[in-house]
Each structure stands twice: as structure tokens, then as C-alpha cells.
Image: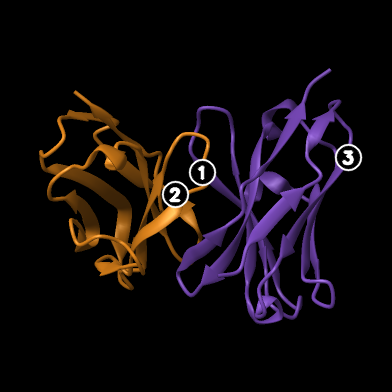
């Protein structure tokens, strides 16, 4: 069974800074069906990036995804106040989630 | 855009049962694979089960171990999760979500299930 490990657990940054979040799979992923979600406190997750790099509808272009094989990255080019949240990666087809990275205000 | 609304959560004793429902206000419910995903308090997301649009295929996470049953009523655009033999560790917010290929494009607001004596 594939395990997704996200790092770091918490990222402390200031608005305007660049955020780089990592998601590593325990086995190589040939299909690149890797999705990133954002979850704010008390809310359901929302999809940001799917198929490793495709932005979902309505997602600002400051969010970008990259990677293949076992290593995937979510980059937020310039943090806006509304971007401070928890981010999860997820792999298909077994619907495996990473444990999450919290992006908090420094 | 379709809206998903869960209901049926609440407080139940260990060993008890609960049935969750998820109402879909969209027009393509019967075409979509649907999932239940849960989130224990302060924890991450965990897939529970999913079901094909016509109900002919179902899959469950290993921890379910025959205790939960996922089903759907396409005539009513409803998704269900029958949960039996509940354990303290099943305490979580349960979300229904619509699969769009490899990801979830719609989520409900969640319903809280608390298993406690």
C-alpha cells in the first residue's frame, strides 16, 4: 500500500512569501494522479491542483503543482492572507491522503 | 454547481449503529462515483468507502472490516453510509464527496459522528 508523506508538518511564513510544500510517495506513481486540497478551519477541503499540475477551476495562478514519480510539490508563489490553511495531497486510485501541512502566519 | 448536504450524525454508544445520508442537488448524481471520507478531530483525511454511479461496484477501506455499508438511491439523489458496530475510533466528521476521475471536485459540509459511552 502506498503511503504519502507530507513535509514539513508546519510551515511558518509571512504574507507575500513563497511556500513550498512536499508530498512524497512510498512507491513510484506512474500515473501522476496526485491532487492537492486546501482545508480551512471548520470547512470542507477544496481541490486546488489535480493530475499533479492542473489547476482546478477558479484557483488563482499563484498556486502551482509539479513533480512525478515519488516526489510532488505544491508551490504558492506569494502567500495571501486567505492562503493560511492546511494542505493535503491525495493519490488515486486508492484515495490515499497525506497527513497534511499546516501553513501558518509567522 | 451541485451541492452536497450530509445528515444523520450524532452521539452513539460503542457498538451502536448510525446511518448517514448525503443529498445531492445536482443533475448528474447517478453518473458519478461517490465517496465517504472522514476526519477525526484534529486529524487528517481518511477515505472510507466509495460506490459507482449505478451502485454496481463498491469498495471499502480496510478498517471498515464489514461494519459499514455504502449504498445509494439514484431516484432520490441520495448517498448512504450504514455504520454498525461503531467504535470510539470511528469518531469523526464524515464528508460525502463526488469523484471526478482522480480527485474529489465537490464536498459536503460534513456531519459529526461521536462514539462515546
Circle 2 chain: A
The answer as to whether the residues below labels 1 and 2 share one chain is no
Label 1, label 2: how many angstroms apart (C-alpha)? 6 Å
Residue B87, percent across and down?
76, 31
Query: Which SS class for mark 1?
Result: strand
> What label sits on residue B17 in the rendered view?
3
In the rendered image of this protein, does residue A90 appear above or below residue B2?
A: above
Circle 1 chain: B
CB atoms of marks 3 and 1 within 8 Å:
no
In the shown orientation, is residue B102 left or right of residue A14? Answer: right
Q: Nearer the viewer, residue B84 or B33?
A: B33
In the rendered image of this protein, does residue A13 appear above or below residue A49?
A: above
Label 3, label 1: how many angstroms apart (C-alpha)? 22 Å
The answer as to whether the residues below labels 3 and 1 share one chain is yes
Q: Earlier in the sequence, mark 3 or mark 1?
A: 3
Circle 3 chain: B
Residue B108, percent across and down?
62, 53
The colour style of the image is: by chain
Q: Which quadrant would the C terminus of chain A be assigned to in this image?
A: top left
CB atoms of marks 1 and 2 within 8 Å:
yes
CB atoms of marks 3 and 2 within 8 Å:
no
Mark 1 = which residue?
B45
In the shown orientation, is residue B84 left or right of residue A57? Answer: right
Mark 2 = which residue?
A97
Letter of the chain shown orange in the rendering = A
Residue B92, percent across and down?
65, 35
Query: Which SS class for mark 2?
Result: strand
Q: Residue at x 28, y 65 (%)?
A: A52
Can residue A1 be seen here? The reply is no
Label 3, label 2: how many angstroms apart (C-alpha)? 27 Å
Q: Residue at x 74, y 29 (%)?
A: B114
Amino acid at each position: 500500500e502506498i503511503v504519502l508523506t507530507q513535509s514539513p508538518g508546519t510551515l511558518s511564513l509571512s504574507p507575500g512569501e513563497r511556500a513550498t510544500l512536499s508530498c512524497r510517495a512510498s512507491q513510484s506513481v506512474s500515473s501522476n494522479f496526485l491532487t492537492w486540497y486546501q482545508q480551512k478551519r471548520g470547512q470542507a477541503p477544496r481541490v486546488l491542483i489535480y493530475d499533479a499540475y492542473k489547476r482546478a477551476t477558479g484557483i488563482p495562478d499563484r498556486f502551482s503543482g509539479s513533480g512525478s514519480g515519488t516526489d510532488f510539490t505544491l508551490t504558492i508563489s506569494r502567500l495571501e492572507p486567505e492562503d493560511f490553511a492546511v494542505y493535503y495531497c491525495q493519490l488515486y486510485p486508492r484515495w490515499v491522503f497525506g497527513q497534511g501541512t499546516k501553513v501558518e502566519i509567522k | 454547481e451541485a451541492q452536497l448536504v450530509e445528515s444523520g450524525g450524532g452521539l452513539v454508544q460503542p457498538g451502536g449503529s448510525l446511518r448517514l445520508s448525503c443529498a445531492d442537488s445536482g443533475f448528474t448524481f447517478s453518473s458519478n462515483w461517490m465517496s465517504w471520507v472522514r476526519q477525526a478531530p484534529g486529524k487528517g483525511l481518511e477515505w472510507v468507502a466509495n460506490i459507482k454511479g449505478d451502485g454496481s461496484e463498491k469498495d471499502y477501506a480496510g478498517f471498515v472490516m464489514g461494519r459499514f455499508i455504502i449504498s445509494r438511491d439514484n431516484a432520490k439523489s441520495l448517498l448512504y453510509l450504514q455504520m454498525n458496530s461503531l467504535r470510539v475510533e470511528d469518531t469523526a466528521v464524515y464528508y460525502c464527496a463526488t469523484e471526478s476521475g482522480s480527485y474529489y471536485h465537490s464536498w459536503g459540509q460534513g456531519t459529526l459522528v461521536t462514539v462515546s459511552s
